[in-house]
Amino acid sequence: MTALPDTVMPEGPLQYQDVGLSENENDIDLGFKYVALRCLGVSALTASLGIWLLPVTPGDAAIQLVKLFLSIALLIGSGVVFSALRAVAGPEIQIDPNTRRLTILERGVDGKVKVEIAHEIDALEEIILQDHLLTARDSHGRPLLAIPISDPEVERAIRNVLSGGYR
């Protein structure tokens, strides 16, 4: 099973700096955490629905109330676990309109910045926002990023930066 990030890197992943762990150990750790969280979320979701299969004596309102609260807690817990899975996404892209810089941040498992690569927007050979997809190439013509943009407000802000509206 492979988890694809929201950000697609056309030339492969960013090159990591040495942080003490080999890439294989880091991949195994991330893969195990992803599978464990996924199993936990599915188990909590199944348990929140399956708790209603347990028989209860008719007229026992206290047990029905306990089942209701437990079911709601498990349902909320599974939602929290699934949202945590989405939080572990690909690199973060920041566009600073004041300094006209595009920064790519890659975070480690602990949330600290592992790699930070900054590019001047004006020094990039090509940066295109077309069909809700932002693509950029460096001065040597190598693809830097390709990101789907779904929010119209974010797309409008990026178009404003690219047209020089923030200068």
Image: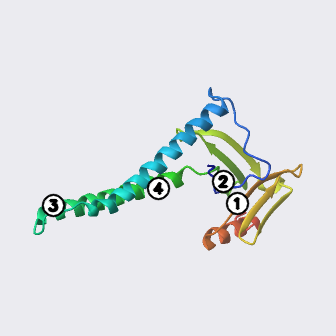
Q: Residue at x 69, y 33 (%)?
A: 17
What residue is drawn where x is 40% and y is 53%? 43
Q: Kindly identify which residue carries mark 4.
A: 82
Point 65% across, 33% down: residue: 24
- Which numbered disc, 2 or 1, marks the residue that appears first in the sequence? 2
The quadrant in which residue 100 appears is: bottom right
Separation of residues labelled 4 and 3 (CA atoms): 28 Å
In this rendering, the answer to whether 152 lies above or below 53 is below
Q: Earlier in the sequence, mark 4 or mark 3?
A: 3
Q: Identify residue for label 1.
A: 147
Up/down of 22 relative to 160, above or below: above
- The disc placed on residue 93 is 2
Are the residues tagged 2 and 1 within 8 Å (C-beta)? Answer: yes
Residue 150 x %, y %: 63, 69
Q: Amino acid at mark 4?
A: Phe
Marks 4 and 2, the one that precedes in the sequence = 4
Mark 3 to mark 2 CA distance (whole Å): 50 Å
Q: How many angstroms separate mark 1 from mark 3 (CA)? A: 50 Å
Choose between 12 and 128: the one closer to the eye. 12
Q: Amino acid at mark 2?
A: Ile
Find the distance from the CA under tag 4 to the CA under tag 2.
Answer: 23 Å
Q: Is the residue 120 above or below the residue 19 in the image?
A: below
